[in-house]
Image (cartoon, helix red, strand yellow):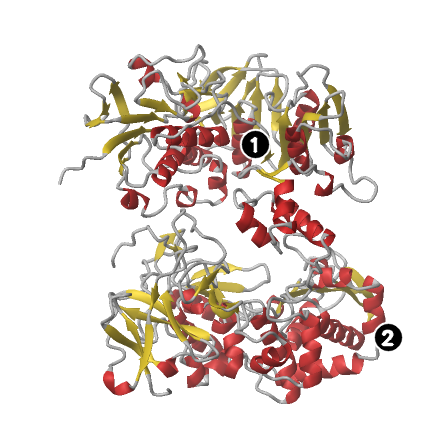
Amino acid sequence: MTGSLVEIEIEPGAGGPWRAVCAYHDLLPGRGTAVLVDGRQIALFRDRGGEVYAVGNRDPFSGAHVISRGLLGSRGATPVVVSPMYKQAFDLRTGACLDEPAGPGGEPAALPVWRVRLTPPASGCAGDVAPPNGGAHRPETTPS
Amino acid sequence: MTDTRRRLVLIGHGMAGQRLLEALTDRAPGAWRITVLAEEPRPAYDRVHLTSWFSGTTAADLSLWPAGFADEHGIDLRLGDPATAVDRTARTVTTRSGATVAYDALVLATGSRPFVPPVPGHDTPGCFVYRTIEDLQAIRDRAGHTRVGAVVGGGLLGLEAAGALREMGMETHVVEFAPRLMAVQVDDGGGAALRRRIEELGVVVHTGVGAQGVGSGADGTVDSLTLSDGRTLAVGMVVFSAGVRPRDELARACGLPVGERGGIVVDAACRTADPHIWAVGECARAADGRVYGLVAPAYAMAEAAARGITGGEGSFTGADLATKLKLLGVDVASFGDAHGTGDGALEVLYSNTREGVYKKLVVAPDGRLLGGVLVGDAAAYDLLRPLAAAGTPPATPPEQLVLPTPEGGPAGPVALPDEAVVCSCHNVSKGAVRAAVSEGGCADVAAVKRCTRAGTGCGSCVNMLTTIVRDELAAGGTPVSRGLCEHFAHTRAELFEIVRVKNVTTFSRLIDEHGTGGEGCDVCKPVVASILATLNPRLGNSVHILDGEQAALQDTNDHFLANLQRNGSYSVVPRVPGGEITPEGLITIGEIARDFGLYTKITGGQRIDLFGATVDQLPLIWRRLVDAGFESGHAYGKALRTVKSCVGQTWCRYGVQDSVALAIELELRYRGLRSPHKVKAAVSGCARECAEARSKDFGVIATSAGWNLYVGGNGGMTPRHADLLLTDADHATLLRTIDRFLMFYVRTADRLERTAPWIERMDGGLEHLRAVVVDDALGICDELDALMARHTETYEDEWRATLEDPERLRRFVSFANAPGTPDPTVRFLPERGQIRPALEHEAVAAG
């Protein structure tokens, strides 16, 4: 499994196409990692048993893209990630929030989910994603 | 394609209007083509919390307009284009810009306008009202030009405005025509208590007088306010908040009936005389003949109208006017028949002029609670309001509930009858909560919230809810688990002993052998990480918290060795032991902040916080800091934070010991020590206590003969002074005692338990602690000493160790598949010469 690539289904439920987003060994056991795919931020998690999950990286309660930095855990038999911002738990299989059904504006607080599969390295190419723009923007500040 | 849906036009986009849109789109999604005509330049916002704008809440924070709401429901929101006329025959609305919009259903939610008494000079520049964000902006601008202001009107809103003026540092006068403040809500006694408390804050109160005229100075702006008793106040600003009047002019112009004293006449379904037109909120005169100026009735009317518009049966016939609020820091509450106007109403009174506390209950001859007024201490409101609404004589005489701490502590919610409403947002009774536990199988507060919705509205009843749930669980014989979480039935202290005795070195082994299996969670993982961080050095294991399996256990802050901020960026705090820093050190930190464009703020712990770093920048920033001799300040960890100090004997005329040298020594000795919660400390060089050592977990105060050691203090939500543990100790005794105190705390405290509650929980309290760490009553001091010695020997700077290891560095990228690309959603805007996080909907200029 070590040399494997992590692939996700780009259009959820469409049966493909699949896209390699990173190497399996990029994933730290028990933690999350973010990847950028066509401008979308996706959080990948690898649990103690080696299972990999893919959910949206945006935390609906804060609007910050931090879900990948949350702690992985379980509630009963449900694998969850706990948002590092305000600590709501999300089901990694469905994206549903287990603590609060709606976000601050009343919108449903679920994360999008993607199907994940592992493939041997020969059949895919990782890291083929270009960032959409220059990244973090800082305004000029003037000394006062 | 033609849109054949029916057309709804909403005039006015305030709180009532927005609630109507939410109720309507909730009940009949997509059924209506909705146009909103708004006068203000921004969508609906929370006017109830308007005053918080002065203390930093932004207009965006106050907004009630969820991102994407308009798109989702296809709503055409036209800001700054108010309706000017309604043609009921053609069923069209004309706007100020000349547009004409046709409707099948029209809702008037035009709100009210502040009443400005027609005194001479009332429109002089420097006169304001208090209703919109624009009003507040104008008030703040004017506050930059004058030091003294007057508020005309001593009601709820007037006192809010007075609080805002005072907050801005102005000398503040309140002018109220009635003989007391808040004349509608409280009686004479309550008004007097309120006045006394407010005057203590420096606000000057004038009651029984009106405003007679506003004078202006040479520049044409306000310079005085003349009162009806002939006195003249020299003020540079006047805020009128003498009540509101419904905005019913559109309705009048199109011939809809309005009340004698204003307000569009509506029936119980909030429908006007025209079956196509509804009116909700402060512009409407409800079926009970009243015009309501509070948000709860406005919301209830919006719901009723939405039900009616969507073909349902809406009904609003009146509202509970019970209120509890904090004005200028003073609690004020009134509920039910507060003025005792009912037949045979009796009064129970508790009045304490010294403390500024006044409580009056109105009671029926048979003991039923009818209403009341609370000023200065409204803690009993949560209990009394449902008792009054329940309408049956309570088991506990209500008068007991207003006495200060009666025998055996204050009566809890046990005294409430089952029919008493605990959560008024969702109308959930105490009986329903108890049934959810005893019959519905709810085992904790979270389950009760999901099942009954209690506590999910404003949240003010959650404390009471918790008590009811706990009591009901206990009554049902359910053992209340002390375990950490669903994965461990042990407390933190018990886990510590298991790890220590069995030499457990990994979380996997601990959860498989001593827990329930599974993945763990956000509660147990960081606890185990903290325990391993303390005990691993003893076994000669790696001490770096990001090594091996331990990395997966750390909270996000520990995992990135930095503090997560609200937009996903991090802040970085280098250690500045004792708060002593060289000019070169300051320059280095300044240069780093400048080069990385970081926001800088001095912390309460005498160091400098650098905000706005992305994950990718953290190692680059640490590199520069470490090269300049700085190290991690552990601001991100449940660990020792700082040892603050005053300048001490070296410079200070009063100092009796070198507090700075001791603070530096202590901070370097305990740096990196992982603990159940954060640990703060301070050293003062004399009894004047400028370092505020008694507000710390451990504090040292110099005496001419040595050092006094205090333990168990903290600031925060429940401030507590530390207690004296050692008197006139020498240097060696002091260090030895602190070593043992800290290690005993790390070993036996619960998760997230500061030292104060830990000592309070201890059987025997401070005396027991003294027996353990001073007299070694348990015979464990050798072990505690050895653990601390091992900690200080093996300490290493986590930043430096991370920089030296490529494997550890690998995680400091925003995206595994695009290293070097920072998170594009982390964006900043300029504010006061530095950066601040941009909110999601705020555009950032390209550049």
Name the residue that disc number 2 marks.
Answer: B777
Please tell me if label 1 and label 2 are on a single chain.
yes
Query: Which residue sits at x=76%, y=61%?
Result: B761
Instruction: Name the side, left or right, on which B588 lies relative to B41.
Output: right
x and y percent of residue B579 in the render? 60, 66
x and y percent of residue B643 in the render? 65, 67
Q: Which amino acid does label 1 sit on?
A: Glu
Query: Which residue sits at x=78%, y=60%?
Result: B723
The chain identifier of the residue carrying mark 1 reads B
Q: Nearer the viewer, residue A140 or B442?
A: B442
- The part of the image, by quadrant, that contains residue B422 is top right
Q: Which amino acid does label 2 sit on?
A: Ala
Instruction: Name the side, left or right, on which B778 lies relative to B119.
Output: right
Q: In this view, does B814 lie above or below B429?
A: below
Crowding around mark 1 (Cα neighbors within 10 Å: few <14, some 14 to 19, many 20+) is: some
Name the residue that disc number 1 marks.
Answer: B171
- The part of the image, by quadrant, that contains residue B179 is top right
Crowding around mark 2 (Cα neighbors within 10 Å: few <14, some 14 to 19, many 20+) is: few
Query: Which residue sits at x=72%, y=18%?
Result: B345
